[in-house]
Image (cartoon, rainbow, N blue to C red):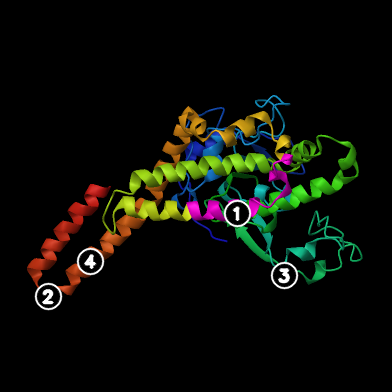
Amino acid sequence: MITKSLFKGNDKMVAYICFSLPASSFSFSCSQFQEYPNYVAYSTPSFFLDDWLNLYLDNHYLHLDSDMNQYKNEISCADYRFVYMGPKGTWTPLHADVFRSYSWSANVCGRKYWLFISPSECHKIFDRYGKNYVYDVYGDICEKEFPEFNKAMWSECMQESNEIIFVPSGWYHQVHNLEDTISINHNWFNSHNLSWVWNLLLKDYVEAKEYIEDIREICNEFERICQRNLAANTGMNLYDFFVFLTRFALANLTLLRDLCNENGAYSLSRVMANHVLSNIRAIRSVALCMVSVEAFSEENLSGCSEENLSVSSVIKGIMEEQNFHDLLCALTTTLEALCQGHVDHCLENMLEEAMYQSNSIWSKKVFGQMKERKLGSLS
């Protein structure tokens, strides 16, 4: 968990999203980013910029299904950037975030009380069968049904106005509004928690098959039904995730090709190339895990929707899409912003070290001027 100041003095933002709400037992959320794309309400903090999920959703739908209207179905989500508003006393039940993503929550105003349990402890909030977990930590918990609950170790945090909470993947949490509260929330994932997304999808896929196993022998579309149920339950299916990985793999490989001719130990291109290589390794690691899964057998690929099948089989077609070029540009811009800070820090340290190693007053003056010119050119 980390907290960071944000929105100080940003009265315009508070005024924009404040409006009266009916009494409710839960917080209300809405996503206004697609509806008002030209209104820049705030800037995402730099350490949360590496957001593959929302970059993708700005250009593509996460779930593709020829049997459904993609633009209006209940599975496709515009993005995972939200404004949460709730009066004093409202709360969010215990849960782990969608796709086992990271999340950050910035309080524009109000106070929240957070209760967390780590992934190593979260088995204690489940029932004896490992299927259902506690809904309300402060409710009446049946010890017979949840025998390990009283042994769980919890972490708590009070979030004030102008502070951000970061929630790592897999941390279950329950949140209470102690005052009338407005917050900005993003769910996102990238190369660092891609394996969490895959592990959740695989677990839910296994369960989706178990639920309808009794019709396997009499159903010619068993795999298609499994994938359809998986998407309805989790937000995407295995084929959607494969297409997602394919597009990001191609985007990172294209970007690496463009960066590979640049030189310089502390150049922006060099730092970006290292970051891109890390992205590609993470994608490869997850892709290798997918190879042995039943859904990707030649026989079961018949369960893949026509849209996903065409996207995953025609690489050239992907790279010619305007949406792919938009995704590539967005990824490039994001990595430039992320890596620029690292380059600035390295250059500053290098120049300071050279300056203070010299005993000459003249050298200190010259290196100081060099530092000002160099850092000024990077800004």
**Crowd class of label 4 (few under 14; some 14 to 19; many from 20; radius 10 Å):** some
- In the image, what residue type sits under mark 1? Leu
Circle 4 sits on which residue?
352
Residue at 65%, 25% in the rendered image: 71
- x, y (%) of residue 59? 53, 32
Q: Does the stretch in magenta take in 288?
A: yes
- In the image, what residue type sits under mark 2? Asn
Circle 1 sits on which residue?
288
Per the model, the C-alpha gap separating discs 1 and 2 is 56 Å
Residue at 33%, 49% in the rendered image: 260
Q: Secondary structure at mark 4?
A: helix
Q: Could you tell me if residue 10 is visible in this image?
A: no
Q: Which mark is residue 153?
A: 3
Q: Earlier in the sequence, mark 1 or mark 2?
A: 1
Q: Which mark is residue 49?
A: none
Q: Secondary structure at mark 3?
A: loop
- In the image, what residue type sits under mark 4? Glu
